[in-house]
Image (spheres, rainbow, N blue to C red):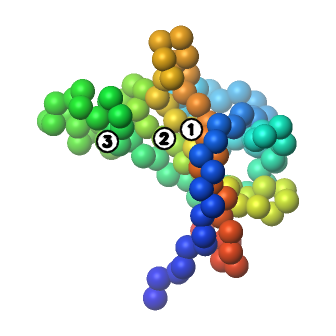
Amino acid sequence: MPIPEPNLRFIDEPIEAVFDSPPIFEKSPPCPAGFIWREQTFRIVELMAEWKDFRRRGRMSNNMIPAHLSRAERIGSWGVGRFFFRVRTENDSVFEIYFDRAPADAGDRKGRWVLFGERTGSSVKLQ
């Protein structure tokens, strides 16, 4: 019998990640220690799950020959990929955040952090 997923309240807004010490690799960061969203700081107390998605999106979806595409979707390539984290915060909220490696433009090549959504419901303690 499958375990029901808690409901996801879709947010999709930029956040500022907070680290106790700066990540060694900017484009492949670990889960942050917290994040700032709408001028409120959320301290992360538990990493519940993490996963990577290296599918090519937008303008990047058509710029690779098919022979190389399957490898790139497994290990990633420059500027492509998202690192997802399901986290519990000090106030017992469960959020899904991610780091998007895609550069915004030529002047901003570092990527960005996004609050994907908030998990709600009685079964948010899923692993």
Residue positioned 54% across, 27% down in the render:
111
Please tell me whether mark 2 sits on a helix, a strand or a loop: strand
Marks 2 and 1 in Cβ contact (< 8 Å):
yes
Q: Residues within 10 Å of mark 2 (few under 14, many from 20)?
A: many
Q: Residues within 10 Å of mark 1 (few under 14, many from 20)?
A: many
State the image coordinates of residue 72 (x, y, percent, origin top left).
Answer: 30, 36
Residue type indicated by callout 3: Glu
Marks 1 and 3 in Cβ contact (< 8 Å):
no
Looking at this view, is 19 or 17 the one in front? 17
Distance Cα–Cα, label 3 vs label 2 = 11 Å
Q: Residues within 10 Å of mark 3 (few under 14, many from 20)?
A: some
Residue positioned 31% across, 41% down in the render:
73
| Marking on residue 73 | 3
Report the number of numbered marks.
Answer: 3
| Marking on residue 54 | none
Residue positioned 78% across, 55% down in the render:
89
Where on the picture, by quarter, is residue 94? bottom right
In the drawing, does residue 50 fall left or right of residue 23? left
Residue type indicated by callout 1: Phe
Please tell me whether mark 1 sits on a helix, a strand or a loop: strand
Nearer-N-terminus badge (1/3): 3
Write down the residue under mark 1: 99
Residue positioned 81% across, 47% down in the render:
42
Where on the picture, by quarter, is residue 120? bottom right
Q: Is residue 36 above or below residue 42?
A: above
| Marking on residue 82 | 2
